[in-house]
Each structure stands twice: as C-alpha cells, then as structure tokens.
Amino acid sequence: MLSRSDRPCHQPVTPTASRVRDVIIVGSGPAGYTAAIYTARAGLDTLVIEGHEPGGALLAAGPVDNYPGVGPFVSGPALADAMRRQAQHFGAELRPGYVDRFALGDEPKTVSMSDDRHHGRALILAMGSAPRSLKVPGERGLIGVSTSAKRDGAQFTGRDVAVIGGGDGAVEEALFLAPLARHVTLIHHRPRLRASAIAVARLRDHPNVAILTSIEVVALLGGPHVSGVRIRSTRHAGDSTIAAAAVFVAVGQTPCSDLLIGLVDLDAGGHILTKGATTCTSAEGVFAAGDLIDRRYRQAVTAAASGCAAALDAQRWLSHPHCLPSDSIARKGKIPS
C-alpha cells in the first residue's frame, strides 16, 4: 500500500519553489513501472514514488508463468526488479516512501510525503490494492493470521494450515504452502473455486491439500496463537472446527484510494472512475492505472497494459492539454492525435 489514510487528505498544500516534474507516478507495481518506462523513454522528466517495498503485489507472487516473454517460472520479485531497472535505464527517478497527501486542484499538482513535497504537471495514480479482511472474530490480534504465505509460510513448516479464499490468489497461497505444511485446507464460501482451471488442477495434485467449498468462516480460534477455524456449511446447519496453526487470508483486494476521496470520482468499491476508454480521471491531468481501476482481471499483464495506457494519455495531455477525448468520443474509439 503506497498511501497512508490516517492523516488528513484534503488540506491545501502550497507548492514550494522546487523542481516541477513532467510526470509523477505514485505506485511501483507493474502499472507504475510500465508507466515510468513509457514516460521516461519519451523524454519526460519522471518521478516514481515507490513506497517502502518496491514492486507492489509482485513481491508476494510466487513463480510467474503467465507473463508474456518471461519464464517459464520467473519469480514475482525478479519480474518486478526487471521492470524497475528498465524504468531506471530510461531515466526515471525512483523515490522510496509513502504519500501522505495529494493536492490536485492547482497547477502544478502536489504530492506530499513525510519529509518532502513533489510537484508535477501530470500525475499517474498506480497505488494498487491491499488485502481485504474476513471481518470475523479472531482475525485481528491472533498470532498466525497472515495475508502472505510467501512472507510467513516457512514459519509453519510441518504444521496444519488453512487458506481462506477461492480465487487465483488463494490457490497460489495454497500451492506455495503445500510443500511446506503437513496439511493445507483451502476454504471457499462458494460452490466452485474462481481460480483458473490449471491452477486448481495443480493444487489437486498435492495429496496433503483438502478443498472445502460452500463453507463459510465463522471465527478464527485460539489465543494468543491461532489454533483453528470455526466453519459453517452454506448447505446445512451446524458449525464445526478445523485445526490450524496458521490462517492465510486471500479473499480479494481493496483499492488503495483512501487519500483520493473527494479528489477524484470513485465507485462504491473505491475504484477510480475513468472517462470512457481512457485512463483520465475526473481531475484534469490526473490518470489512473492498475488495480485502482481494474474491477475484474487484476493480473500483472493487465496492470502493465493500463500503465502503458496511462503513460500515453499523460503524454498526449501534456502535449495538448484539455484535448483528450470526452466520454462519448472515447466510446467511439476516436482518439485525437
């Protein structure tokens, strides 16, 4: 997550007499780095604010075998590092740290950090998303509740663990844990997993993995360490308990858009609304990419594609401000050159 929501986000910021960039990109995943590659390669003065862990969601990814041109099994962190180095190669400046506040109403736009402020003519938002919580008793405070098997899974080698979720992220967590844990239980509240068929097939090949569907998580048990999961079938009454020394929660993502409330238009889920087929937000000269706008696909390759689109839209806007297509023009595919 690349922005902090525990500080005021609507206070006016007076620009200082510092350097004004052509483009500031907030975010360091595939969307942010791809945008930086395109803008820096085009000769634009580009600053990327990376957060404290550059690479975004790729840092938690295992082997990546579905990104064109790499692989067959390049790790997520290695892919992120390659993107980062490519952005640097073309001249993008990379800055660690979090954004505390945005000021988008004036020119130039201002991005405030704890120790500095940066000013840019155009802004590309690519802060990604953060893991969604279960919102059940015991989720907060118990030791052994995690959102990343890659980070925490090795601690539970040889023990029973549970993974909550049914998408590609949950199956990937279970695949990572299967060679380490004594037993892995994947719990999903729907009748079928939403993950890709090939990923599910790989998971079923592991004899120490059980997949439970149509099962809801009622509570996480234990204290201070996790000891189990209380579950309930959606098909019949009655609760039961599964023993687990750790629980890995993978029930989706929430866009990191808290600091943008009131600054750009958002939908009910917190995703940034863009105009027509473009990456333009409701704020002039502000563009969005990656998980901030992706409600459906949420893949590294689609994030990179939207980062490319945001960079091209920003380049076009910088050359001809205010001339990007309106909603009606964009829907017809008529983008002015």
Image: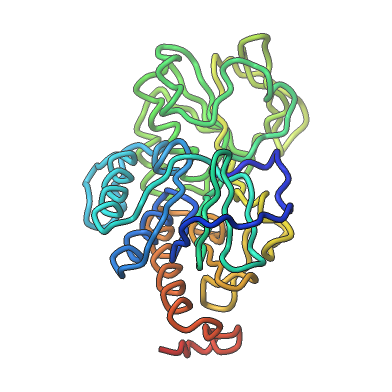
Determine the residue positioned at 74% across, 34% down. 236
Q: Residue furthest right?
A: 237
Instruction: Report x, y in % for residue 332.
Output: 52, 89
Note whether 314 is above or below 217 in the view shown.
below
- Coloring applied to the structure: rainbow
Note whether 192 is above or below 302 in the view shown.
above
Note whether 333 is above or below 226 in the view shown.
below
Horizontal placement of 134 versus 146: left or right?
right
Quadrant that contains the C terminus:
bottom left
Q: Nearer the viewer, residue 203 or 67?
A: 67
Q: Residue furthest top?
A: 224
Q: Residue 242 appears in which quarter of the rendering? A: top right
Instruction: Report x, y in % for residue 112.
Output: 59, 48
Determine the residue positioned at 28% across, 65% down. 41
Q: Nearer the viewer, residue 180 or 337?
A: 337
Horizontal placement of 231 versus 253: left or right?
right
Instruction: Report x, y in % for residue 53.
Output: 43, 36
Q: Residue 155 appears in which quarter of the rendering? A: top left
Quadrant that contains the N terminus:
top right
Note whether 249 is above or below 11 in the view shown.
above
Q: Nearer the viewer, residue 59 or 204?
A: 59
Total marks shown come to: 0
Q: Residue 105 appears in which quarter of the rendering? A: bottom right
Instruction: Report x, y in % for residue 243.
Output: 59, 15
Determine the residue positioned at 44% across, 44% down. 56
Determine the residue positioned at 47% across, 50% down. 27
Q: Nearer the viewer, residue 181 or 15?
A: 15
